[in-house]
Image (tube, rainbow, N blue to C red):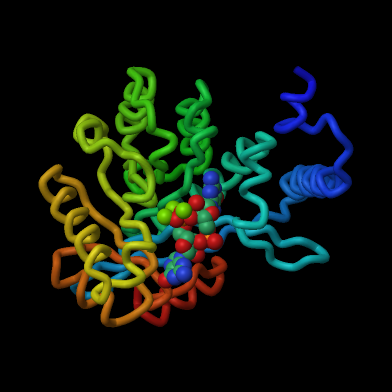
């Protein structure tokens, strides 16, 4: 029995695993302190309308301004945040910061959407809706400008509880979007039952259009599915004019990607908006 277990568990001393575990622990502790010390920052990536390229909103994306290592990207710390549960305080900080930015736009009369990523763990907390309600109230933002991006993994089992939670969020006036659409295991039959306003076409399907016939098929199927279900679409990762034109001609209403702008710190976003007259 001990022999069987040895294959998959760490009963035997393996130095490289200990180093790995130690690194993770140090990263976790550093991240915990970073949240307390306000080392996290949000960058904002504009989303633009396909027809006239006007800005319609943006996605808030977290970064970690590490005092020694510089600016860290989500890929470097979101995994540890998820595994350690730190994604919960991190996620609330992101939501509160994004809601404050949204409120300040609204105070200037700007009608823009703020999209915020919500991890599956966050969404599954029984007090998630209460947190969102409180954070919104504290910020003074109109909920109509807030869009929560959920992933297929958060909605994998659309239990009555999950559906009820989504409806509560919608009743608060918030919009829901499905992020990275096409990469998970969404069953098309449950999509129609969920109160989702937008699908975000994953950038892996945008990357090789119009050259790759399979990606073209997936992009077009997503656009027509969304249309038939009465949902909007945002294409992620639009980098070239050729991609933009292809998607626009096929009715994709909103786009996001380096072609328009990289994710920007708040002050640079302000300048980007000023230059465009937003
Ligand atoms: P995502 O939500 O799918 O965000 C889009 C990612 O694509 C961002 O990466 C963005 O910088 C990148 N991107 C945008 N346009 C382009 C493009 O034209 N080309 C390429 N190659 N990439 C583009 P980022 O900021 O590194 O974030 C990665 C992921 O980390 C996000 O994917 C999201 O899943 C997660 N994440 C980021 N911020 C948060 C957060 O506040 N909370 C949670 N739970 N997850 C977050
Ligand atoms: Mg997202
Ligand atoms: Mg995405
Ligand atoms: Mg993603």
Q: Which is more toward the observer, 242 or 266?
A: 242
Image quadrant of residue 255?
bottom left
Where does the image place residue 253, in percent across and percent down from the top left?
21, 63
* Residue 33 in view of the camera: no
Where does the image place residue 21, in percent across and percent down from the top left?
81, 43
Image quadrant of residue 109?
bottom left
Where does the image place residue 274, in percent across and percent down from the top left?
42, 77
Q: Outermost residue toward the left? A: 228
Which quadrant holds the N terminus?
top right
Image check: 157 left or right of 83?
left
Q: Which is more toward the observer, 31 or 278?
A: 31
What residue is shown at x 88% (from left), y 46% (from top)? Answer: 15
Where does the image place residue 187, in percent across and percent down from the top left?
27, 36
Image check: 80 left or right of 130?
right
* Residue 4 in view of the camera: yes
What residue is shown at x 10% (from left), y 46% (from top)? Answer: 228
């Amino acid at each position: 029995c001990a022999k069987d277990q040895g294959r998959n568990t760490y009963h035997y001393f393996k130095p490289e695993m200990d180093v790995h575990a130690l690194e993770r622990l140090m990263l976790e502790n550093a991240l915990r302190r970073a949240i307390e010390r306000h080392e996290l920052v949000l960058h904002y990536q504009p989303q633009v309308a396909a027809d006239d390229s006007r800005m319609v909103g943006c996605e808030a994306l977290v970064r970690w301004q590490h005092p020694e290592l510089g600016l860290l990207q989500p890929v470097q710390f979101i995994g540890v945040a998820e595994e350690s549960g730190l994604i919960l305080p991190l996620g609330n900080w992101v939501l509160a910061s994004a809601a404050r930015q949204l409120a300040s736009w609204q105070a200037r009369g700007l009608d823009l959407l703020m999209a915020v990523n919500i991890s599956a763990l966050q969404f599954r907390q029984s007090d998630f809706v209460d947190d969102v309600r409180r954070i919104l109230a504290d910020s003074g933002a109109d909920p109509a400008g807030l869009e929560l991006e959920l992933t297929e993994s958060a909605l994998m089992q659309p239990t009555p509880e999950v559906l009820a939670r989504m409806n509560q969020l919608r009743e608060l006036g918030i919009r829901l979007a499905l992020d990275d659409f096409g990469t998970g295991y969404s069953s098309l039959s449950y999509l129609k039952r969920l109160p989702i306003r937008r699908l975000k076409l994953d950038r892996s399907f945008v990357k090789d259009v119009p050259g790759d016939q399979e990606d073209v098929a997936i992009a077009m199927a997503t656009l027509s599915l969304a249309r038939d279900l009465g949902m909007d679409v945002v294409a992620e990762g639009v980098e070239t004019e050729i991609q933009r034109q292809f998607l626009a001609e096929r009715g994709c209403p909103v786009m996001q990607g380096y072609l328009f702008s990289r994710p920007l710190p708040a002050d640079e976003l302000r300048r980007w908006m000023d230059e465009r007259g937003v």
